[in-house]
Structure formats: structure tokens, C-alpha cells
Amino acid sequence: MTLCTTIDSCLNTMVQDRVFESVTVDLTEAEGIDSTSLGLLAKISRLATPKMGQIPLLISNHADITRIVESMGFRDRVYTMITQQDLTDASSLQEADLVPLDETTARARVLEAHKILMSLNENNRRAFKDLVECIENQVL
């Protein structure tokens, strides 16, 4: 959740770039992943796929993270998933600059991320329905 503003800013810059043509998400250094991050990953794919004509690439070496991502319905629908060993050329990857996060923006991003997750499948809809309703009932 703490990176949602950074990811959102990077995504907007990326898809507006005239030479934009591919997306690779590298989770090999991630120690865990929360539902907000999963929703943002789904958003990245949703916005990037039409511009690229194919789904983005997601790299994960951790079985627990891979299992969570797959349980959300990402494999082959939202991302092409590979391990770091499968990746042959990572020389052009770079880290995004961090963007500060305020409470109002964070709440909006968390809500959006979970709504996107809910739209992927019925299990996700049931899993996140109460959380989304709770966030929507808070004063934004």
C-alpha cells in the first residue's frame, strides 16, 4: 500500500509515453504482497494491455507470492508469469522514483485497487466485497 501513489504515477507516465511498448513487473525482491498491490498490478495490466496488444510480464521467484497472484486469477489472463531464471535480459530495467502518499490519496487507491480485483472473478468479488463497502462508507 505504501507504494500505491508511486505505482499509479509511474503507470500514468508510462501509458502516456508515445514510445510505450512493454511492461515488466519484477517481484523477485518482494517479501510479501497485499491486496492493494494486487489491485494495482491488475490496473497496470488493464491499462497497458490495450496499448501493447499483449498482457504484461510478471517475474516472481517466491512460491507464496506466485500462489497469491495466481489465486487472484492473474496467470495468462492478466500477466504472463515467469521466474527470474526465465528472464534473459534485464539490463534495461530501472527503479521508479518514490512519490509521497497522503491519507486521502491512499484511501482512493486502496478502494480502486480492490474494485479492480473484484472485477477479475467471483471469488475475489466475495473476498473483498465487505472491505470495499467499508472503505466506501468512510468519509473521503
Image (cartoon, helix red, strand yellow):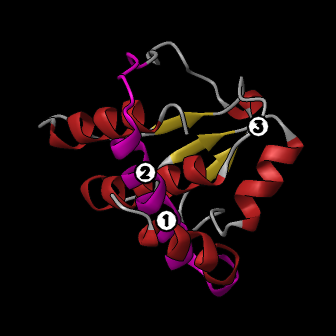
Which residue in the protein does label 1 denote? 135
| N-terminal-most mark, 3 or 2 | 3
Q: Which mark is nearer the camera, 3 or 1?
A: 1
Q: Residue at x 23, y 43 (%)?
A: 15
CA distance separating discs 3 and 1: 23 Å
The residue positioned 36% from the left and 61% from the top of the image is 139
Q: Is residue 55 visible?
A: yes
Q: What is the quadrant of the C terminus in the image?
A: bottom left
Q: Earlier in the sequence, mark 1 or mark 2?
A: 2
Q: Which element carries disc 3, helix, strand or loop? A: loop
Q: Quadrant of residue 105?
A: top left
The question of residue 64 being in magenta is answered with no
Residue holding disc 3:
32
Determine the CA span between mark 3 and mark 2: 20 Å
**Going 26% across and 36% down the picture, which residue do you hit?**
14
Circle nearer the N terminus (3, 1): 3
Please tell me whether residue 108 is drawn above or below residue 6 in the rendered image. below
Q: Amino acid at mark 3?
A: Gly
Q: Choose top left, top right, bottom left or bottom right for residue 11.
A: top left
Q: Label 2: which residue?
A: 107
The residue sitting at the front extreme is: 139
- Residue 110: % across, % down: 48, 53
Q: Which residues are magenta?
A: 96-124
Classify mark 1: helix, strand or loop: helix
Identified by mark 2, the residue type is Arg
Dot 1, how many residues are within 10 Å of its Cα: few (below 14), some (14-19), or many (20+)?
some
Among all residues in the image, which is located at the extreme right? Answer: 63
**Depicted 22 relative to depicted 30: above or below:** below
Label 1 and label 2: CA atoms lie apart by 7 Å
